[in-house]
Image: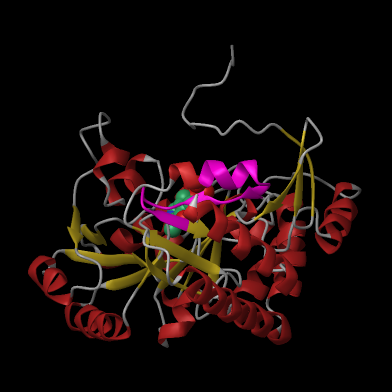
Amino acid sequence: MSSIFPTYARFDVEIEEATGMKVTDTSGKTYIDFTSGIGVCNLGHRHPAVHEQIKLQLDKYWHVSNLYHNPIQERVAKALTSKSSGDLVFFSNSGAEANEAAIKLARKVTGKETVITFEQSFHGRTFATMAATGQNKVREGFGPMLEKFAYATYNDIESVKQLIDSNTAAIMLESIQGEGGVVPANQDFVDELIQLAKQYEVLVIIDEIQTGIGRTGKGFGYEHYGLDPDIITVAKGLGNGMPVGAMIAKEKYKESFGPGSHGSTFGGNPLAMAAAEAVIKNVFKPDFLNEVKNKGNYLMAELNKELKNIEMVKEVRGKGLMVGIECNQAVSSVVKELINQGVLILNASPNVLRLLPPLIVTYDEIDEVVGLIKQALVK
Ligand SMILES: *Cc1c(COP(=O)(O)O)cnc(C)c1O
């Protein structure tokens, strides 16, 4: 019997080793990884540059308190702010903690209480981020929830207008809803949302935890929309598997997060920072991001072409290498079949197959997996 709480319904795969696009299980079977560990290992498993940078840091120090200056944190923060619309960074260990920091900062800055989020959103599993998450199944049994979250309908500006008022501190959204089924925001919706936020002096928090760090073919998903968010949160892809999260925000909020106002013992851990430094250096290269965009377009085109006569498939959608295949029924058996065929793949909401391959995926690997997906869907 397992000694671990069964909070994850695990697949029947026991991992032994992983390199690049390949994962090997303890029986010696290999899999092509189209999950990146849920959008984490964006450079593939044990990327040499990340490996090297962690090793260098391993020989220097692993932890000192955030009570001391830490040059590697400064470098990563500079890199993140130079690549985003934010100016100052708070480092956490996870996505949920980055969102916690964002929610706390928004309340402190504005002196207001309500945070508007969206149905089918996902923002984490802590009390605040669970309350922020617009999915009952995440909140069930854990009540009472933290107060003052209100849920609008994604891509429906009227639903936001009905909720926003003088007590609204922030609107928080994903640029593409990930767990909710790979649903991109519409440009019109985002434009009107920004106007509304300005009118009511409400902060806009973009949760880039799944969409950030090159996943969509741009550094951050919000760049597709020409947005200038007040607060951005990242995690998953930032450390290529080393646990790290970050909240990136405008300089004008500096006073609200002064000494003693917020903190984390491990936040910005030097080994995680070493990984993040290598990740940012490699992912944010214009040529690399351009290739992600090209490969994403190719993947979508191939899926549209190959799956167009399959009755079960309703729609292929996404941006870059974040792609969803919406079906007219639950896809859990398809996921299992693909695992049998040696492909690790995810679902997002019951009916959507979700593809999040490492950004280093090759065109040949895309062809191979598209073929296997087609086979699994007609089976
Ligand atoms: C995964 C995810 C989170 C939560 O991140 P954790 O590191 O698991 O806490 C929050 N928001 C989005 C959009 C995510 O995809």
* Residue 364 is one of the magenta-drawn residues: no
Residue placed at 27% from the left, 67% from the top? 171
**Quadrant occupied by the N terminus:** top right
Q: Is residue 17 left or right of residue 341?
A: right
Counting from the top left corner in percent of width and height, residue 279 is at 72, 66
> Residue visible at 36% across and 51% down?
349
Instruction: Name the spot of residue 194 as percent of width and height, x first.
Output: 27, 82
The answer to which quarter of the image holds residue 153 is bottom left
Above or below residue 223? Residue 173 is: above
Question: Residue at (49%, 32%) from the top-left corner?
Answer: 8
Q: How many marks?
A: 0
6 relative to 376, above or below: above
Q: Which residues are magenta?
A: 335-353
User: Is residue 303 rendered to the left or right of residue 229?
Assistant: right
| Residue 177 visible in this rendered orientation of the protein | yes
Reply yes or no: does residue 343 show up in magenta.
yes
Who is closer to the viewer here, 217 or 101? Answer: 217
In this view, the residue in front, 83 or 318, is: 318
| Residue 71 position within the rendered picture, expressed as x and y whole percent measured from the top left | 76, 63
> Residue 274: horizontal and vertical position, in percent?
77, 58
Name the residue located 67 percent from the left edge and 53 percent from the top edge. 33
Residue 263 shown left or right of residue 280 in the figure: left
Outermost residue, top side: 1
Give the answer, above or below, for where 150 lies relative to 281.
above
Applied colour scheme:
secondary structure
Asked if residue 98 can be seen in this view, the reply is no
